[in-house]
Amino acid sequence: MGVFVLHDEIKKYVWTNKKVTDSAIRTFIKRVREKTDKDFIKNIPGLGYKINTQER
């Protein structure tokens, strides 16, 4: 189970009213993965990310 998040949603809610590149989003996701379980966020190519909401 998980939540699907589009690239545009990340841009809208993380960087409110600022222009951000896809590269910046990838860096942001990479840093989140470094601080969490690497399976917490899965890449969905061309669309966005799936965030695992199940507790382990």
Image (spheres, rainbow, N blue to C red):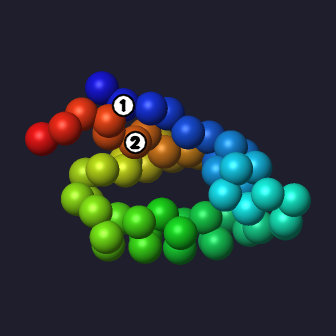
Q: Residue at x 63, y 71 (%)?
A: 23
Asked which secondary structure carries label 2, the reply is strand
Q: Residue at left 65%, top 51%?
A: 10
Residue 5 position in % (x across, y down): 56, 39
Q: Which residue is mark 2?
A: 51
Mark 1–mark 2 distance (CA, rounded to whole Å): 5 Å
**Taking 13 as reference, is 53 left or right?**
left
Amino acid type of the residue tagged 1 in the rendering: Gly
Q: Residues within 10 Å of mark 2 (few under 14, many from 20)?
A: some
According to the picture, the residue beneath numbered tag 1 turns out to be 2
Q: Residue at x 43, y 40 (%)?
A: 50
Q: Look at label 2 and name its amino acid.
A: Ile
Q: Tell me: 56 left or right of 22.
A: left
Residue at the outermost top position: 1
Q: Residues within 10 Å of mark 1 (few under 14, many from 20)?
A: few
Please, is residue 36 above or below residue 5 in the view?
below
| Viewport quadrant of the C terminus | top left
- For the N terminus, which image quadrant? top left
Residue 9 % position (x, y):
68, 43
Q: SS for tag 1?
A: strand
Q: Position of residue 39 (x, y in %)?
A: 25, 51
Q: Looking at the image, which is closer to me, 15 or 49? A: 15
Q: Are marks 1 and 2 in contact (CB under 8 Å)?
A: yes
Q: Quadrant of residue 26?
A: bottom right
